[in-house]
Amino acid sequence: MFAKQVNLVIVDDHPLIIQGLKALLSSHEQLNVLASFTKGQDVIAFLLGQEVDVVILDISLPDCNGMDICREIKTMAPATRVIALTNHNERSLIMQMLQNGANGYLLKNASSEELISSITQVMNGQLSFSTGIEEIITQPAVYEQGPVPKLTRRELEVLKLIAAGETSTVIADRLCVSPLTIEMHRRNLLQKFKAKNVAVLIRMSFQLGLIK
């Protein structure tokens, strides 16, 4: 399966997860778990004096952000492969991990076969993803789907009030216009953003930085 023995380190804040991973990986003769840590900075100190092939890294750690630890690992030991193992499937987190140098991204519901396959893939110089993760990262983010819609000053006012949870009647009173005018602005906003409902409209507006 592997051309040589693979030295691994596990970083996760849950001891039970670490125990399970150790038991799984140790059942393979060519996989050698050198150490495990519950804190990110501890693995950084360990890597200063050890040659590690693969770090299996959780994103959520008690002392720091796993994404920052990934970047530190790749800076100090570029040849070390990093596989994120996490419950987070948000596209922004996946992309940030990849930008920080991660070689793989697995969800914690991955099978043991997926994990072993992922280690094999990253050792062969490939990127490796859990089932479904590749689909997430290939879908364009909202801001990648086209230019930011051009809004009039009044449309932006209406948008912010909608995001604040105000009704069309309240918005109309606030802006001294009729409720029908606000409904027209609401329809125009949905069309400009190509949003199917107000919830999507608000989420897209936050992602685009139009409202905070």
Image: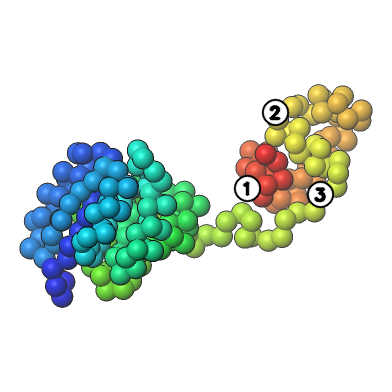
Q: Is residue 203 left or right of residue 187?
A: left
Spatial separation of the CA atoms under disc 1 and disc 2: 18 Å
Q: Amino acid at mark 2?
A: Gly
Give the residue at x 25% y 70%.
123
Q: As displayed, is residue 1 above or below residue 9?
A: below
Are discs 1 and 2 less than 8 Å apart at CB?
no
Q: Secondary structure at mark 1?
A: helix
Question: Relative to residue 18, is residue 168 depicted above or below?
Answer: above
The quarter of the image holding the C terminus is top right
Circle 3 crowding by C-alpha within 10 Å: few under 14, some 14–19, many from 20: some
Q: Mark 2 falls on what kind of element?
A: loop
Instruction: Give, as a three-letter code, the residue at label 3.
Output: Leu
Q: Which residue is mark 1?
A: 207
Query: Badge 2: few (under 14), some or many (20 or more) residues near its Cα, within 10 Å?
Result: few
Would residue 157 be found to the left or right of residue 20 on screen?
Answer: right
Say whether residue 128 is visible.
Answer: no
Residue at numbered disc 2: 165
Give the distance between the C-alpha atoms of the residues marked 3 and 1, in whole angstroms.
16 Å
The mark nearer the N terminus, 3 or 1, is 3
Q: Image check: 118 left or right of 132? A: left
- According to the picture, the residue beneath numbered tag 3 turns out to be 151
Measured as percent of width and height from the top left, residue 88 is found at 40, 46
Q: Element at badge 3?
A: loop
What is the distance, in whole Å, between disc 3 and disc 2 at their CAs? 19 Å
Q: Quadrant of the N terminus?
A: bottom left
Residue 73, image x, y percentages:
34, 59
Residue at the image point whose x is 10% and y is 55% from the top:
26
Mark 1 or 2, nearer chain start: 2
Residue 12 in the image: state x and y as whole percent: 27, 45
Q: Pick whichever of labels 3 and 2 is earlier in the sequence.
A: 3
10 Å crowding of disc 1: few (<14), some (14-19), many (20+) = few
